[in-house]
Image: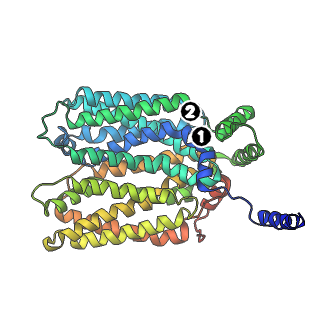
Amino acid sequence: MSAKKSQSPAQDSLASASPPVATFLRLGHKNHSQWNALGSASFVLVSGGMSLAWGAGFAVHSAHRDQLLLTVHMQVAWYAAATLGAIFGAFYTHRLPQQPIYILGSCLVIASGILFLAWPESSSAVIAARYLDGLANGLVFVPALSTVGEIAVNGIRGLLASTVEQLATNTGILMQLIYTAVWRTEWNVAIVADQVHGVLSIIYGVIALALALTLCVESPVHLLMRSNEQRAVVSLRHLQRPYMVTSETLLRLDEHKLYVAASREMCWWLSLQKGLPPLVKILAHRLLGSLCLNLVIWSALFETASQLVSSFHAWPYVVFGVLRWCGCFCVVLLMDTTGRKKPTLFGTFSTGSFAFAFANLFGRTPHMIAALVVLLSLQFFAGLGQCASAVYLTEGFPLAVKPHLVAVVYVMELITRLLLCSFAPSLDWIAAYFQVLGALSMVFFLLGIFCLPETRLVTLAEAQQKFTKWFNKDF
């Protein structure tokens, strides 16, 4: 009996010396409602990823593939509508509830899918479908990326933001590449390739609509900005498990109140001044990502793979999409442990290195296998290096101007993608393009060492304060 008593103090001291630490899975389970709150936006962006890949040339079995290169209306439709939606989003975010916007975006995606499914041979119907899908993505992108950091706890903010935007978009790209790769025009089936696109869009839209109607939760910061503290507490309660007010809920409420109060102390002009450094950094990061998926990249893949096989078989498409998705997925899981800065710099440096390598190998027939391997590997590191850009979007800007600057970054990205998807490049132009891509990646890598902040496990206010500095050497 005395032996047992003598052991108990030792056991107690051991337990107190190693307190239980919340594992990644427990943290994810406890805060799963935060992803549910943005799940609708995520599925709308999956549809947007498919449209991005379609417009970048990965639609070789579409009846409208030639028109994509020859018809300005077909090229511009998705990007113009997404731009318009983003402009609207900049003005209603933090002013209107999110749920009606997500419901509208989901319905637009469903309508787009129906047009693809019902009239796949009609150019007018496909153009209208791309308008609807683009509008849905623009309407959803700005509020989702503006509020994801406000909904997520600090410990999973990186995971949630990168999942909602980057992983969702790359999932849509992968789905487009898979069905494009496996489709065969000689198949004796009643459905055509564009109808598959429509079916998938309808599925994403229905899931997004269901999530918007049942699980959408308003941002507590938005409610505090409307001076509705009681509803903000209810929102925080629904964003965690168990669904009750705890000391942690009240701590998060105080954190959000300080965030809103700090924003109110700054005039709009001062907020815009503080938003300039993050705008330059994040815009450079996002534009670099847009250079890694466009018609030039598709042309490089097609020209390289067609030199190796008599006909362009499915596997280069599949490997291209899988590697890009895997690069993103691997880093999503590290956003709140390893951080944002190190994966970004590593991915950017690797992208630049592989871009230089591909430019030197492209067009040299004995080295086309190596060129294809390099091009496919480049996509892995492109997905890896861009993952943190979604996190930076939700962290970097002052609250008063956040939706407007998120919209500016998104619109500039859309314009860049449109310009790069509006013409078919020559072989010499492709090699020069990859030289430029490599040079820009290396410049961003070098500047990023000194300018990009590390924002893991800090509050939104602290992250925004780091971004206001032009130079950040922390890792």
Residue drawn at (46%, 33%) of the image: 208
20 and 82: which is toward the camera: 20
Q: Residues within 10 Å of mark 1 (few under 14, many from 20)?
A: many
Residue 55 visible (yes or no)? no
Query: Is mark 1 in CB contact (under 8 Å) with mark 2?
Result: yes
Residue 41 visible (yes or no)? yes
Residue drawn at (60%, 37%) of the image: 94
The location of residue 289, given as percent across then percent down, is: 39, 57
For the C terminus, which image quadrant? bottom right
241 and 70: which is toward the camera: 241
Secondary structure beneath label 2: loop
Residue drawn at (77%, 63%) of the image: 15
Q: Amino acid at mark 2?
A: Leu
The location of residue 43, given as percent across then percent down, is: 44, 39
Residue position for label 2: 215
Disc on res. 33: 1
In the picture provided, is 107 more to the left or to the right than 65? right
431 and 378: which is toward the camera: 378
In the picture provided, is 193 more to the left or to the right than 236? left
453 lies above or below 189: below
